[in-house]
Image: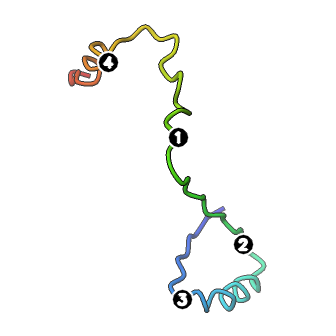
Amino acid sequence: MEQLILNIKDSSKLSFLMQLIKQFDFVEVEKVKKKKKSDKYDFFNSAGLWANREINAKELRKQAWDRTK
């Protein structure tokens, strides 16, 4: 199955376009919900990200800057 994404410039024409597309029996229409942006990042949700890991800041920098890979 092929998919096609349409960006509608004039939202007042959307209902006409939807009625037209629904007339074709070989086309299925799916509404895609837009994701809500979170208001702000909660730093404390990241707590424990490095828990139980044997790594320190020096080793982390060494791995990050290693360009030989």
Residue 50: percent from left, percent from top: 47, 19
The tag earlier along the polypeptide, 1 or 4, is 1
Amino acid bearing label 2? Val
Residue 47: percent from left, percent from top: 53, 26
The tag earlier along the polypeptide, 2 or 1, is 2
Residue 16: percent from left, percent from top: 68, 92
* Whether label 1 touches label 3, CB < 8 Å: no
Amino acid bearing label 3? Asp
* 69 relative to 23 in the view: left or right: left
State the residue position of label 2: 29
Give the spatial CA distance, label 3 vs label 2: 19 Å
* 42 relative to 62 in the view: left or right: right
Q: Nearer the viewer, mark 1 or mark 4?
A: 1
Secondary structure, mark 4, is helix
Give the spatial CA distance, label 1 vs label 3: 36 Å
State the residue position of label 4: 60
Mark 1 surroundings: few (<14), some (14-19) or many (≥20) residues within 10 A: few
Give the total number of marks visible in the rendering: 4
The tag earlier along the polypeptide, 1 or 3, is 3
* Of residues 67 and 23, the one drawn nearer to the viewer in this rendering: 67
Identify which residue is drawn at 65% across, 87% down: 17
State the residue position of label 3: 10
Give the spatial CA distance, label 2 vs label 1: 36 Å
The tag earlier along the polypeptide, 4 or 3, is 3
The tag earlier along the polypeptide, 3 or 2, is 3
Amino acid bearing label 4? Leu
Q: Nearer the viewer, mark 2 or mark 4?
A: 4
